[in-house]
Amino acid sequence: LANIISGCLQESDLLVRYGGEEFIVLLPGASLSQARTIAENIRRMVSKTPVSINRDTSITISVSIGIAEAGVDDTVDNLLEKTDTGLYLAKQNGRNQVSVA
């Protein structure tokens, strides 16, 4: 999954593991519209790329993505909270989608 996501990013973007099964992508300088486009690209690529779970078996997976734009007064915790809100919206609305907080 990390390889699929990183293949959708630019060199200046940052992909990190967060928690057990979550990732955070930081897109410095990207607008909210650009972030949504990148997130949709990641979602599509993940959905159409089989993931090997062993030598003989591959599965197709999906992702739910929440995005938020950092404001001047946002702290890291506040930004994570906003992004989590977007993630939960994506999950509540049927999964395998991008939601803006």
Image: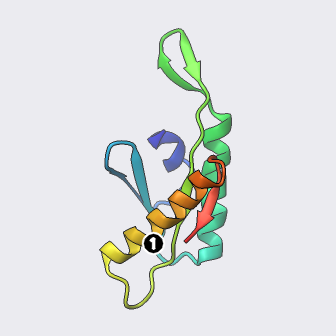
Is residue 41 found left or right of 7 in the rendered image?
right
The residue identified by callout 1 is 82
Other-residue count near label 1 (Cα within 10 Å), few / some / many at <14 / 14–19 / ≥20:
some
In the picture, the quarter occupied by the C terminus is bottom right
Q: How far across and how far down the image is residue 17, in percent?
A: 34, 49
- Identity of the residue drawn at 61% across and 29% down: 60
Is residue 57 found left or right of 43 in the rendered image?
left
Q: Nearer the viewer, residue 82 or 34?
A: 82
Q: Nearer the viewer, residue 47 or 84?
A: 84
Q: Under tag 1, what secondary structure?
A: helix
Q: Nearer the viewer, residue 72 or 11?
A: 72
Specify the farthest residue to the top. 56
Is any part of residue 13 visible from this angle? no
Q: How far across and how far down the image is residue 71, in percent?
A: 45, 86
Decide: is 62 above or below 16: above
- Identity of the residue drawn at 51% across and 22% down: 52
Q: How far across and how far down the image is residue 91, in percent?
A: 57, 51
Is any part of residue 85 visible from this angle? yes
Q: How far across and how far down the image is residue 41, in percent?
A: 66, 53
- Identity of the residue drawn at 67% across and 64% down: 37
- Identity of the residue drawn at 36% across and 77% down: 78
Q: Amino acid at mark 1?
A: Lys
Colour mapping used in the image:
rainbow
Specify the farthest residue to the bottom. 72
Res 31 → quadrant: bottom right
Q: How many numbered marks appear?
A: 1
